Image: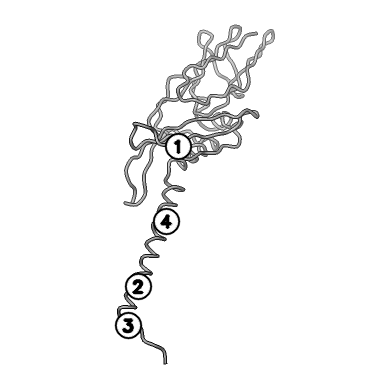
Amino acid sequence: MSERLSPTRVAAIWAAALVVLAVVAVSVIALVNQRVFGPAQMVKTLHSHLVNGEGARALGLLNAKVPPGNALLLDGEGLKAASADIKDFTVGEPEENPGAEDTVKVVASYSVHGVEQQTSYQLRNAGNRWMFFDEWEFIPTTLPTVAISANTTNEVVVNSRPAPLVKGRATVPVFVPAVIDTSFATPNFAADSRGLAVTDFAKKDTAVKLRT
C-alpha cells in the first residue's frame, strides 16, 4: 500500500515546482527580450529592410529625416543596389553609452569588396511592451548624403540609375551602410568612380568628383 503524502510535503513539492516554473519563465522572458525585442535585433531588422528594398519601413524604423536630394537609392531596386555589396553583415552585443542613461551602441560588422567595415547604431530604451519586454528605438538622425559632380555632362549614372545634374552636381541621400557606383559616358567623354562605401551617419556630402 502506497504511503500517503502529508499536506506539508505536498505543499513543499508544489512550492518547489512553482519555483522551477518561475525560474524557467524568467529565463524564457530574458531570452525573448534579447533575441526578439533587443536593440541588436532592431539593427538586424533594419538591415533586412534595406536588403529587400523596403525603404519606407527602414525609414520609419530608423526615425531618420531625409535631406533634400535625389531619392533614387532610398527605395525599391535602387535601395537593393546600394545594399547588394554589403556582405557578411553581423551584429555585436549592445554596449552601454557612458553618461547616457537608457541608451546603447550596437556595432555591425560587414565587408565591402573584401574590405572589412563597421557601422555604429545608437538606440534608446522607450519603455516596456506587455509589461515584461523592453522596447527599443533608434535615436533620431538624418541620413547622410553623397555629393556627385561632373564637368562634361548633364547626367550621371548612380548604381545603374540615371541622375540628372544641376549646375554640374547631384545630391543623393543614402541609408547606412551603402555602396555607391557612379559613372557617365558621352560620345566624347567618360568617367567612373566605383565602390564608395558610406558607413557613418555623421558623413554629410561625401564628395564624388567624376573627371573625364
Kindly report which numbered mark, 1 or 2, lies closer to the viewer in this rendering: 2
Q: Residue at x 37, y 62 (%)?
A: 22
Measured in 3D between alpha carbons, the distance from the residue under mark 2 to the one under mark 4, in whole angstroms, is 20 Å
Q: How many marks?
A: 4
Circle 3 sits in a helix, a strand or a loop, which is it? Answer: loop
Structural crowding at the residue carrying mark 3, measured as other residues with C-alpha within 10 Å and reported as few (<14), some (14–19) or many (≥20): few
- Give the residue type that dot 1 points to: Arg
Tags 1 and 3 touching, CB below 8 Å: no
User: Which colour assignment does the render follow?
Assistant: one colour
| Residue that label 1 marks | 57
Q: Give the numbered dot on residue 6.
A: 3
Measured in 3D between alpha carbons, the distance from the residue under mark 1 to the one under mark 2, in whole angstroms, is 48 Å
Measured in 3D between alpha carbons, the distance from the residue under mark 1 to the one under mark 4, in whole angstroms, is 31 Å
Structural crowding at the residue carrying mark 4, measured as other residues with C-alpha within 10 Å and reported as few (<14), some (14–19) or many (≥20): few
Kindly report which numbered mark, 1 or 4, lies closer to the viewer in this rendering: 4
| Residue that label 4 marks | 27
- Give the residue type that dot 4 points to: Ser
Question: Along the horizontal axis of the image, is 192 left or right of 178?
Answer: right
Q: Is residue 134 above or below residue 197?
A: below
Which quadrant does the C terminus fall into? top right
Structural crowding at the residue carrying mark 2, measured as other residues with C-alpha within 10 Å and reported as few (<14), some (14–19) or many (≥20): few
Circle 1 sits in a helix, a strand or a loop, which is it? Answer: helix
- Give the residue type that dot 3 points to: Ser
Measured in 3D between alpha carbons, the distance from the residue under mark 4 to the one under mark 3, in whole angstroms, is 32 Å
Kindly report which numbered mark, 1 or 3, lies closer to the viewer in this rendering: 3
| Residue that label 2 marks | 14
